[in-house]
């Protein structure tokens, strides 16, 4: 597709059609039901397949004699039958979550193509689109044949794991409009990029370009539109990315490499830090392209000369630049010549994830900017008033270390849709002028030091979808007019000083609300027993509200609820049967620190349960095999551990188990082989008897607490296998034998060791002195004889009146 030469800016709404290729549905090829593909191209594709390794048999439809236009991943031209698109990316929807089982991860890896790239691709003379992203070609170097596919307009090789350097002959692809090389690739030169004269989208995210010292080229003395520049001797970015302003899903940024493990909330569960951010899953830059813009937005604007002296101006000569993305490049500064050279076209500026220390003044000469993202840098000082002069601004993201007050001039940005100054050190009140921003959709000032009340104007922002003032010092209550925000999806004011009564009117028209995050305030709910909420929330956080004494009847109408926190809520009632039988499956359930009574036979919770400090009775509840955290401390559960721990053949994923301070009796069952992920086990203050089962010692625990039971016998030698122990507490039992020397030999990370009030005898082993991180040791009330080893002086991590440089072990243990 040729791109016409433009003397005036092209309307942004036209640009999705330039890059429509990746969004074309594979079903197009079904229109060719009466058209067999070209025989030579079918043979070329079969040669290509024969050199691939396809563990999951994704290409099973690629067979001899078949119509290649109907093969999976193949798109043919409707009229000519020529193959013009190959979409062979690894299926993105099959990527497992962080807590997936090994079998799920294995299935995902098997879905990736491997092997070699056969040169038969060159026989596809009309191939315009090729996508091999997210596969596993780690066994081969980056093939040079991609640079010979001269008809390509779309090439996506992101995270395909090719080895070696990017071949320079990619610069021969003069028709290329979209190039995605994100991932762990390397290049010592980027001169070849200058040959991509039609390029609209370039992605080098996470590529290693630190040796590419020629990524900029000297340009003529007169200023031309440019996409990159650098000051002599200045820092070189690790990756650069330029995207054409698109609409909808085409604007979603390529994903970062997915983490396979994430840290669970720190215990005790003050609150889940994984806040509901469904609104954030939509790229904020979508807000930029929802309307049709006239050419006036993109025309040249006069700007003051902020150019840096001694700078060498450079250009890749990609003159249609609308978006400049230099995120995650470790930049300490960005030359002002970029702004001057790009001022005619630049609409989106993304410098997030760098180490900038101050707001760049030349930004304020770019009056046509629609989106500015300076988040996750090291910006300090107050927010400049100049932002109020960028009149077309729709997105402003300044998450940093800024202080001072929010400028009144922000209220002059009449087009603003996203305003995010969270995670700064801002103080003062929320300006009244923000109430004039009738187009505002996302307002986030969370994690600052703002005071005063939530302004009355909140009810006038009819377009508002997210309102987040979490972790500030706001007082009073939130206005009744909040109930008029019919578009609101996220309402968050956790950890503030709000008080007084909350009525049904506060929620009267919140029909789209999915997240109500309001824990840790001083609010009281006064609702009629027959109230039916207008919303269907997925997440409700009302911990530390006064909600009792009766259980919340209106929760039975929440059919989509997956996260619920009503801890410390003054509820003293019997757990209703209907709540335990809700059709929804919870991801997180926190009912702790109430006075709930009754028995619980089954918990339909997938990840985290906290029922501690209530008055529950009866046997321990059955739980889902995949549960991660179970906290039942300080109740009156009775019976044995067998049904909970052993009555399932499924592999357990449990990581944290607290059943301390209950009435659990009998022996600890010897069925711990399924709990290889368990890190914290607290069975203290029960009525347990018997010996420590051998299988318990085969777990790599961080915390093992059996305190205050009636257990006996010697410590099993298998316990020395738990080499990651940080806390070992067997006090107040009837254990006997000698204190094993392997405690000092195998448990080098121990911080707390308590064997108090048992029947241990013999001498204190000298190996205890090897515990360099030990801070608390209690061996009192045993039958130990002999002298205290002099080497105890070597336990330098022990608290003393003298200062020491010895730091105790403090690694993460809750994952």
Image (cartoon, rainbow, N blue to C red):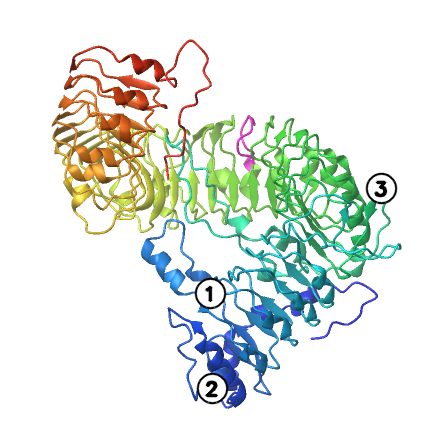
Residue 390 point in image, percent of width and height: 77, 45
Name the image quarter holding the C terminus. Answer: top left
Q: Is residue 56 magenta?
A: no
Q: Is there any visible trace of residue 9 in the rendered image?
A: yes
**Is residue 41 found left or right of 552 in the rendered image?**
right
- Residue at mark 1: 90
Label drawn at residue 309: 3
Going from the N terminus, do you reach mark 1 or mark 2 first?
2
Per the picture, the main secondary structure of the magenta-coloured stretch is: loop
Q: Is residue 470 magenta?
A: yes
Residue 153 drawn above or below residue 254 = below
The magenta span reads 469-480
What residue is shown at x 45% (from left), y 29% (from top)? 520
Residue 359 point in image, percent of width and height: 72, 38
Going from the N terminus, do you reach mark 2 or mark 3 first?
2
Q: Nearer the viewer, mark 2 or mark 3?
A: 3
């Amino acid at each position: 597709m040729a791109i016409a030469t433009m003397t005036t800016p092209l309307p942004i709404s036209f640009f999705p059609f330039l890059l429509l290729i990746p969004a074309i549905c594979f079903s197009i090829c079904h229109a060719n039901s009466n058209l067999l593909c070209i025989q030579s191209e079918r043979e070329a594709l079969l040669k290509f397949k024969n050199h691939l390794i396809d563990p999951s048999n994704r290409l099973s439809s690629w067979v001899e004699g078949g119509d290649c236009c109907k093969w999976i991943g193949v798109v043919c031209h409707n009229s000519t039958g020529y193959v013009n698109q190959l979409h062979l990316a690894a299926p993105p929807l099959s990527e497992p979550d962080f807590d997936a089982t090994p079998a799920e991860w294995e299935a995902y890896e098997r879905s990736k193509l491997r092997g070699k790239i056969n040169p038969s691709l060159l026989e596809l003379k009309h191939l315009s689109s090729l996508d091999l992203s997210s596969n596993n070609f780690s066994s081969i170097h980056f093939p040079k044949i991609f640079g010979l596919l001269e008809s390509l307009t779309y090439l996506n090789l992101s995270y395909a794991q090719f080895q070696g350097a990017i071949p320079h002959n990619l610069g021969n692809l003069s028709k290329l409009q979209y190039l995605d090389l994100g991932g762990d690739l390397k290049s010592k030169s980027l001169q070849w990029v200058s040959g991509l004269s039609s390029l609209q989208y370039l992605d080098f995210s996470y590529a290693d370009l630190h040796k590419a010292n020629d990524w900029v080229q000297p340009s003529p003395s007169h200023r031309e539109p440019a996409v990159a520049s650098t000051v002599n001797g200045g820092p070189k970015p690790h990756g650069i990315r330029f995207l054409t302003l698109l609409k909808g899903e085409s604007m979603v940024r390529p994903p970062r490499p997915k983490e396979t493990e994430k840290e669970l909330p720190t215990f005790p569960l003050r609150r889940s830090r994984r806040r509901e951010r469904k609104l954030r899953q939509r790229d904020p830059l979508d807000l930029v392209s929802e309307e049709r813009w006239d050419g006036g937005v993109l025309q040249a604007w006069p700007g003051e000369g902020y150019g840096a002296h001694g700078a060498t101006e450079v250009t890749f000569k990609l003159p249609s630049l609308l978006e400049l993305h230099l995120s995650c490049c470790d930049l300490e500064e960005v030359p002002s010549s970029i702004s001057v050279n790009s001022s005619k076209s630049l609409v989106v500026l993304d410098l997030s994830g760098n180490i900038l220390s101050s707001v760049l003044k030349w930004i304020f000469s770019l009056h046509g900017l629609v989106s500015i993202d300076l988040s996750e840098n090291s910006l300090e000082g107050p927010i400049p008033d100049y932002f109020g002069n960028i009149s077309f601004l729709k997105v402003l993201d300044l998450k940093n270390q800024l202080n001072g007050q929010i400028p009144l001039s922000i209220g002059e940005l009449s087009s603003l849709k996203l305003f995010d100054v969270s995670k700064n050190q801002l103080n003062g009140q929320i300006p009244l002028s923000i109430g004039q921003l009738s187009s505002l959709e996302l307002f986030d000032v969370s994690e600052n030091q703002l005071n005063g009340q939530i302004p009355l104007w909140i009810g006038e922002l009819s377009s508002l979808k997210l309102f987040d003032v979490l972790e500030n010092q706001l007082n009073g209550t939130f206005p009744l007019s909040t109930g008029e925000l019919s578009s609101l999806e996220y309402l968050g004011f956790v950890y503030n000083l709000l008080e007084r009564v909350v009525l049904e009117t506060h929620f009267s028209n919140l029909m789209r609300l999915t997240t109500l995050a309001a824990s840790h305030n001083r609010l009281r709910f006064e609702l009629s027993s027959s109230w039916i909420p207008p919303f269907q929330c997925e997440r409700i956080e009302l911990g530390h509200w006064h909600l009792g004494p009766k259980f919340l009847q209106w929760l039975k109408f929440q059919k989509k609820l997956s996260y619920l926190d009503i801890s410390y809520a003054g509820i003293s009632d019997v757990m209703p049967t209907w709540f335990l039988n809700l059709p929804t499956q919870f991801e997180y359930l926190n009912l702790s620190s109430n006075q709930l009574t009754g028995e619980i036979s089954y918990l339909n919770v997938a990840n985290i349960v906290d029922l501690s400090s209530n008055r529950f009775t009866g046997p321990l509840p059955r739980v889902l095999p995949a549960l991660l955290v179970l906290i039942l401390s300080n109740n009156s559960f009775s019976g044995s551990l067998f049904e909970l721990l052993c009555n399932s053949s499924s592999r357990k994923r449990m990581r944290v188990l607290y059943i301390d301070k209950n009435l659990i009796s009998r022996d600890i069952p010897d069925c711990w082989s399924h709990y290889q992920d368990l890190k914290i086990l607290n069975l203290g203050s029960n009525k347990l008897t018997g010996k420590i089962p051998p299988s318990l010692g085969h777990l790599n625990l961080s915390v093992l607490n059996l305190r205050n039971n009636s257990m006996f016998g010697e410590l099993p030698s298998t316990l020395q296998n738990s080499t990651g122990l940080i806390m070992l507490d067997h006090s107040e039992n009837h254990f006997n034998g000698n204190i094993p020397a392997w405690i000092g030999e195998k448990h080098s990370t121990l911080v707390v060791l308590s064997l108090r009030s048992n029947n241990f005898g013999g001498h204190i082993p000298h190996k205890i002195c090897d515990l360099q991180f030990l801070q608390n040791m209690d061996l009192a009330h045993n039958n130990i004889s002999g002298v205290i080893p002099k080497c105890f002086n070597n336990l330098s991590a022990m608290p003393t009146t003298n200062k020491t440089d010895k730091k105790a072990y403090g690694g993460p243990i809750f994952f």
